[in-house]
């Protein structure tokens, strides 16, 4: 889910609903597993930038305070459903 600024309608953050720390780890490991199969020597500049974006996403997911924020967002969404 993408959260937008209510005044400017500019994307502010991405919220990934999860139910446990284990699920966060599964997403992280899945992304790392896919990235580990890519031969960096054989890719073009566009794919290289896409890979950097995925690593940036992983960095946000691995910050110490992020898993709890992800869990909180997941619980909130589950309550709304």
Image: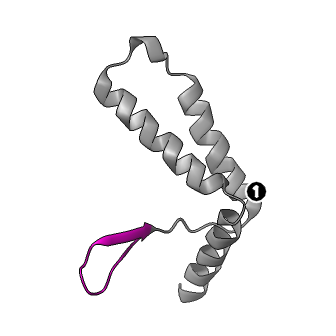
Asked if residue 25 lies left or right of residue 4, the reply is right
Q: Give x and y (percent) for residue 19.
A: 68, 69
Q: Is residue 19 above or below residue 41?
A: below
Do we see residue 34 in this rendering? Answer: yes
Q: Is residue 41 above or below residue 6?
A: above
Is 41 covered by the magenta stretch? no
At 53% from the left edge and 84% from the top edge, which residue is drawn? 81
Is 3 covered by the magenta stretch? yes
Q: Is residue 59 above or below residue 3?
A: above
At 69% from the left edge and 64% from the top edge, which residue is drawn? 67
Nearer-the-camera pick, 54 or 34: 54
How many numbered marks, from 0 up?
A: 1
Instruction: Identify the magenta region.
Output: 1-13
Task: Provide the residue designation for mark 1.
Answer: 22
Do we see residue 1 in this rendering? Answer: no
Asked if residue 11 lies left or right of residue 80, the reply is left
**Callout 1: SS:** helix
Nearer-the-camera pick, 39 or 8: 8
Q: Quadrant of residue 37?
A: top right
Nearer-the-camera pick, 15 or 45: 45
Q: Give x and y (percent) for residue 40.
A: 47, 17
């Amino acid at each position: 889910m993408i959260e937008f600024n209510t005044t400017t309608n500019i994307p502010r953050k991405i919220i990934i609903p999860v139910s446990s720390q284990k699920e966060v780890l599964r997403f992280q490991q899945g992304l790392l597993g896919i990235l580990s199969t890519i031969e960096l020597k054989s890719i073009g500049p566009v794919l290289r930038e896409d890979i950097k974006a995925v690593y940036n996403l992983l960095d946000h997911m691995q910050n110490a305070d992020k898993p709890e924020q992800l869990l909180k967002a997941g619980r909130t969404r589950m309550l709304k459903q």
